[in-house]
Image (cartoon, coloured by chain):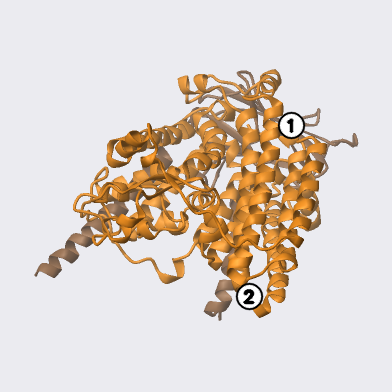
Chain colours: A orange, B brown
Amino acid sequence: MILFHPGLPEWLAIVIGLFMLQTVIWQMFEKAPRQTNGAGLSLARVPLVAGVVRYLTGHTWPLMWLKVIFATLFLLIIWAGLSGTPVVERNLATTVTWNLWWTGIIIGIVFSGSAWCAVCPWNTIADWLVNHGLWRRNASLCRLQLKVPVVLRNVWPASLLFIGFTWLELGVGIVASPYATAMMALLMLVLATTVAALFEGKAFCRYMCPVGRTVGAYSQLAPVALRPIDEEICRNCKSLACYHGTEKVAPCPSKLVIGRLQENTYCTSCGNCTLSCPSQNIAWQLRSPAREAIVEARGHLDEAFFMLTILAITALHGLTMLDQWQPLVAAIAKFINDDANQLASFTIGLVACWLLPVCLFALVSGLTALSLRNNGGGFKKVFSGFAFVSLPLAFAYHLAHNLNHFVRESSDWASIMANPFGRDGYSLTMVEKHMRHVNIMIPEDVLVGLQAGLMLAGFIIAVIVIRHRGFRLFAAERLQLLPMLLFAVAVTGFNLWMLVQPMNMRI
Amino acid sequence: MLNKKRLRKFIGPGLLLSCCCAFGHQVNTPTYSAEKMTFATVAGPYSIRYQVSPGFPKPNETTHIELRLDRPDKQPPPTKNLSFTIYQRGWLGIGKPEVVGRLTYQADGSYRQAIVFTQPGDFFVRGATDYGLPDLPLRVGSGKPWQPVTTVLAYLLLLLGGITLYQKIAKGSQSL
């Protein structure tokens, strides 16, 4: 027997739908926006917290301890998965990985941008292994420092790994196996270490890591980022210590100059720049959310595909947890005469779910390019320039969906930490599952309100992205942007429909 | 002759196909108690109930495996073209699995077998049916945690040691 989470009330979805309609009509008559508010507020200038922020960004040990804690937890997860109980809900490996990390990492972006990458255990352990040191710059012989082949200098590998990761998670079902979860963790460690040993910088994080690229893409919407405290100091800087590093501190692994940084996509918040800056001019900054996606970020085809992949895979995650998914896979299985494993059928479903939004976006890009042919808008430029619209749409649904998992499926962490291997633990009874289902972290109404608010915010930001990017890149406004607006309406509408449906409990 | 272009055409679908063969789509999760582990799934027109007792089998203890196929339309259970084999998983789950036993057809329409596993490890029951079946899980003891860990450690040692050695040789030949 499977328990289902209740969905959003239908009336709320209708209200959001009406709001979307009204927004589209308003956009038809409203002039394009000419200006954007770009001022950020450095936390190093905020009274009361300034001292703490400067101390934390100017010292190595806080980040180092966080890295040690996360790396230890990661190794414990591997060992628990390999040697602990096969009972999914009792094993630290599955509960922490899928209930806490996989859901929490997306929610965390709202509060800390790309900070996860700074403490990511895959990269931390790989770094320790190849650099033979905890943080200091050194000349380890374990690194070949090869240049990444030109063909791999894009996020296509990350897109493919993301789809592969999803295939393993939802298709093979490693979520339901602590052992497979641990094997997956080992595989990622091997990949990260191999790439770190062969190539210069953080090639794995930059080009291949599906989680890092997702965090990077979403952090363009985050209201926090590492930025200069005083931009004038960076403008006059001659040393570029953030880029080159110092005698003790390694250079920026993503080869970014923080003074000129406009996109958070590749910043891993590793803190090298905060430590190496001779003027101690880099700290966390509060800024207008989604500013990068709205105006600053430049469009690239590989990144555009990655953003659309996030949109598609996020929707697929939701879809597979609905009651309608399994009959759909079964129908494909019957059609292609698949065996009961149904993996080939699932794979077809996955590919279809990935292609559908990509093709839909290609279609609206084509229509937009047609209407903008006199404004210098070729298909490729329109496709990569407007792909940012998928970020707020995907992020909003991702957050709303994960919030459901997070507040409704929270494990009994005290007992799991006390018995991480789940020795002598049995599966939850239906009564226990039901109790967990009923005792949610926050009141039901608050959860529903948050989900509805997120969907609304995602749509509003998407409209702002379309209007600003449309005008800035192609001097387009009003009716010329209608196909893109309809894309945002279609995606939000579908995501809303999924949120209205009852959803399968994951663990 | 396969040229590069034609070869590329085969690599994608080939990889996809081999991946699909190496793994199975998990359509349900087993339920564990001290007495038994149960797993229910559907294959073709059959609903399948798979049960292992005790719930957490240990080496050198008798383990009872039972599998029951039912048709919702109350048709008699199938007896032909069906066999269920117990395998031990190969190296890291990707090596060739070894046969350790078979389930026997009983008069009541179920398939059963009592078996004593002499060593811990990951086993599974695979059915040869007209409709195929997901592999049914069966862990004895605490599995083999050292196998993947030592494999990874050996690989990393080889990789990092190899690179270090290469760099030292390259440095040495430069200084000569």
Residue A363 in percent (x, y) is at: 72, 68
Residue A430 in percent (x, y) is at: 70, 21
Residue B161 in percent (x, y) is at: 26, 53
Q: If the image is split into quadrants, where does the N terminus of chain A sit?
A: top right
Element class at badge 1: strand
Residue B65 in percent (x, y) is at: 66, 28
Residue displayed at 41% across by 58% down: A261
Q: Which mark is residue A4?
A: 1
* Quadrant of residue B40 within the rendered picture: top right
Q: Which residue is mark 2?
A: A377
User: A48 left or right of B19?
Assistant: left
Residue displayed at 71% across by 76% down: A370
The chain carrying label 2 is A
Residue displayed at 73% across by 71% down: A367
Residue displayed at 48% across by 26% down: A421
Query: Residue B149 or A188: which is nearer the viewer?
Result: A188
User: A144 left or right of B15?
Assistant: left
Q: If the image is split into quadrants, where does the C terminus of chain A sit?
A: top right
**Is residue B100 something one can see in this rendering?**
no
Element class at badge 2: loop
Q: Amino acid at mark 2?
A: Gly
Q: Is residue B171 above or below residue A47?
A: below
Q: Earlier in the sequence, mark 1 or mark 2?
A: 1
Query: Residue A86 or A446: which is nearer the viewer?
Result: A446
Of all residues, the one furthest to the left in this rendering is: B176
Q: Residues within 10 Å of mark 2 (few under 14, many from 20)?
A: many
- The verdict on a common chain for dots 1 and 2 is yes
Query: Residue A135 or A163: which is nearer the viewer?
Result: A135
Q: Amino acid at mark 1?
A: Phe
User: A464 left or right of A8?
Assistant: left
The chain carrying label 1 is A
Q: Residues within 10 Å of mark 1 (few under 14, many from 20)?
A: some
